[in-house]
Amino acid sequence: MVIASAFAKDPEDSVKMVTDYLKRLDSIDKKLSYKTGGITLKDGLATINVPANFKFLGPVDAEYVVTELWGNPKGETKPLGLIVPANESAVTASYAFIVDYEAMGYVKDNDADKINYDDLLKELKEGQVASNAERKKLGLETMYLEGWASKPYYDKDKKVLHWAKEYSVEGGDENTLNYDIRVLGRKGVLNMQAVAGMSSLDSVKAHINDVLSMVSFNDGNKYADFNSKTDEVAAWTIGGLVAGKILAKVGLWAVILKFLKFIVLGVALAGGAIWKFVSGRKKKQEEFVYQPQQTNDSVPSANP
């Protein structure tokens, strides 16, 4: 749905097209079932308490937004939901958190203090070569890891890991932000990944604690509920989570950012068409206003 290239040559038609397009987005948004308050996730696994300054979409709507509206391929399962700012539409939000869960088992955190994240970054950049080869096969733009947008940090008391990466994307005007949050549980990990451009980094970081405070595992599923006699231990530790060996979803974000860029560009171009149309009409009107020519007698003296 690339509207930037679809504007008519006639400014009046361009104005109508962008107006109709914005009405369509509004109509789509009104069909989404936003929720706030306490919401149970994945058959009682966890609970999300959505405050008034955010809103939440369940699995069906979240998948629809991510795939049909943002233009991404469907995953094997639906996401658990989508968190967006209350004053924005999920269709064109400046940032959003996709909520998901990976039943990978109990993740041991005894390596958290031993990881050299600078060395890990080098490994990630080297691994990007193979990733880009695969992306090319799929017809996707290549991505290049520029560095940490926010260095990995593990809160041992809360059992929460978060970090952010900055990527440049082939043909992109703005670098991509991947801000990841992992909440460790008894049998797996809750994932919350922010989708945004780098210009939204400050906004995302300002609300990290808000998002973290929303989601919690229910009793029986918390990290402290682990039973070494019955529960499976994950093959990956904290370092493995940051390295992305479990969830290889990097390709998803570039497509999302690209799609949102098209929307912004389209509206910007339409706005330019509107301004040229209005200013052009004003100029034509001024051309028909009689302006008496000044004679030498009517020119005011420079020295009164």
Image: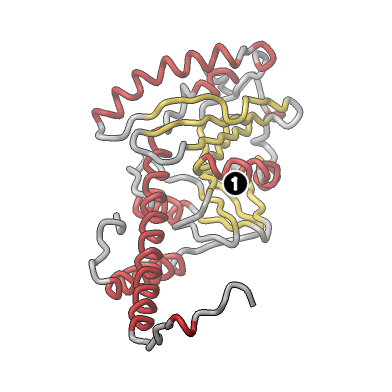
Q: Of helix, strand and loop, which one carries label 1?
A: loop
**Type of residue at label 1?**
Gly
| Residue 280, above or below 263 | below
From where the camera sits, is residue 76 visible? no
Where is residue 243 shown, x and y percent of the image?
51, 21
Quarter of the rendering containing residue 291: bottom left
Where 75 falls versus 88 (above or below)? above
Q: Which residue is mark 1?
A: 44
Residue 295 x/y as whole percent: 42, 83
> Would residue 149 appear left or right of 158 to someone viewing this image?
left
Q: Which image quarter is the N terminus in? A: bottom left
Compared to 202, does 58 lie above or below? below
The reply to whether residue 3 is in sight is yes
Residue depicted at x 60% and y 60%: 86
User: Hey, which quadrant is residue 133 in on the image?
Assistant: top left
Between 265 and 283, which is closer to the camera in this rendering? 283
Please state the horizontal and vertical placement of residue 165, each as a whole percent of the image: 53, 30
Q: How is the image coloured?
A: secondary structure
Residue 119 image position (x, y, % from top left)? 55, 11
Q: How many marks?
A: 1
Please rate how many residues cluster around mark 1, counting C-alpha atoms within 10 Å: few if below 14, some from 14 to 19, many from 20. Answer: few
Residue pictured at 26% horizontal, 28% vertical = 136
Q: Residue furthest right?
A: 157
Residue at (51% x, 49% y) in the render: 81
Q: Is residue 297 left or right of residue 148?
A: left
The image quadrant that residue 286 belongs to is bottom left
* Relative to 7, 239 lies left or right: right
Seen from the viewer's position, the closer of residues 189 and 273 is 273
Residue in front for this viewpoint, 98 or 44: 98
Q: Quadrant of the C terminus?
A: bottom right
